[in-house]
Image (tube, rainbow, N blue to C red):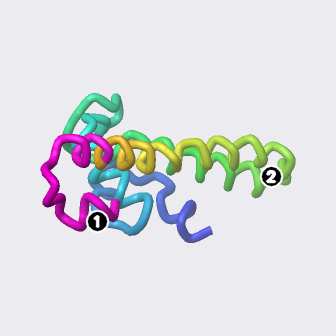
Amino acid sequence: DDVAGGASGTTLTQLSSKGFLAYSLANKRCKNFKTCGYDGNSAVGEAKVNVELWNLFSEGQRKLLVGQCGDVVSVKNRIAQKMTVPLIQGTLRYAYKQSTTTASTPPKEKGE
C-alpha cells in the first residue's frame, strides 16, 4: 500500500530519487537504451517503464478499494510483464559487453 499509495499524484521529478532494486535498475538501463521519459525516447529522466508501473500500481489500488478484486489479476499480470523490461535490458547490455571485450573481462560484466 505504501509503495503504490506513495506515488499517487507524483510527477517524474518527484520520482527521480535513486530507488532500489528493479526501480533503480530500470532508471539505469533506460539511459543505455534511450527508454527514459514519458515517451520512452530519451536518455535522461525517469524510466518509461517505471512511470507505467506507478500507473498500474495506482490502477490496482483503485480497483481493490472499490472491491473489484477479480479485475486486479490482469493488472498484476501487466505489472509482472513491465517488471521484466529492465532485466531483459540488463541481459542484452551485458551480453553485448561480454561479446565485445577481451579475455580479461572485469568481474562486473561476468556477474551481471
Query: Disc 1 designates what residue?
Result: 18
Q: Position of residue 43 (x, y in %)?
A: 20, 38
Helix, strand or loop for disc 1:
loop
Q: Up-down: is 50 above or below 3?
A: above
| Camera-nearest residue between 4 and 106 | 106
Q: Amino acid at mark 1?
A: Lys
Q: Determine whether the residue tagged by mark 2 lies in a helix, strand or loop.
A: loop
Q: What residue is shown at x 18% (from left), y 41% (from top)? A: 100
User: Does 75 sit above or below residue 10?
Assistant: above
The magenta segment is: 95-112
Judge by depth and name the residue closer to the eye, 43 or 4: 43
Q: Main secondary structure of the magenta part?
A: helix
Q: Give how far across and how far down residue 91 sits, in percent.
A: 39, 47
Q: State which quadrant residue 107 falls in.
A: bottom left
In the picture, the quarter occupied by the C terminus is: bottom left
Q: Is residue 109 magenta?
A: yes
